[in-house]
Image (cartoon, helix red, strand yellow):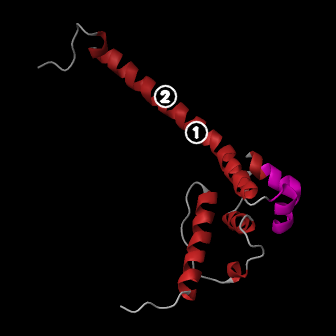
Amino acid sequence: MPVFSDDDPAGRPESSLARAKAARREFREQTAAHEANKPFVIGERLRERREAIGLSVEGLSERMGVPDTWVEDVESGRTTSAVTITQWVDLVWATREPWPDERRLRNTGRYGWAAGDLLYAAEDIVQHHLDVVEQQNSPEQET
């Protein structure tokens, strides 16, 4: 049974190779476009977090102790890649109510590897902390 058919242009080896190369090129271009857009998507998510609690750029920058332009640059996607995981965690705490929240000062031992989107990682760290604090504050249930 032949693998390639001379009757079908798509079945010829050179045509199949050209299609495979084109598919790989298209995948690389899509991946590059996605990666190039990621800082803007992350910045938009931060803006949505801030606006969800009715906080202005000035209010967030005051909570963070940074200039207004820094917050604007992060929200616009210009500097999201330069923001450290510590700064992302601080941003997540700063975009929560009530503020200041004394629970954020407790160490719940959340450490680990964070990949790619540091805002998601920061949200996970804060949520884990809140879960631990909630468990510590809840009465023991008897079985």
**Which region shows up in magenta?**
55-73
Q: Earlier in the sequence, mark 1 or mark 2?
A: 2
Q: Label 1 belongs to which residue?
A: 34
* Whether residue 78 can be seen here: no
On the rendered structure, is 2 left or right of 57? left
Q: How many marks?
A: 2
On the rendered structure, is 127 left or right of 1? right
The x, y position of residue 79, in whole percent, is 75, 50
| 119 in relation to 18, above or below | below
Q: Are marks 1 and 2 in contact (CB under 8 Å)?
A: no
Disc number placed over residue 51 in the picture, else none: none
The x, y position of residue 56, in whole percent, is 83, 57
On the rendered structure, is 119 left or right of 62? left
The x, y position of residue 104, in whole percent, is 69, 78
* Whether residue 99 can be seen here: yes
Q: Main secondary structure of the magenta part?
A: helix
Q: Label 2 belongs to which residue?
A: 25
Q: Quadrant of the C terminus?
A: bottom left
Q: Residue at x 76, y 52 (%)?
A: 74
In front here: 103 or 36? 103
Q: Secondary structure at mark 2?
A: helix
Q: Residue at x 66, y 50 (%)?
A: 42
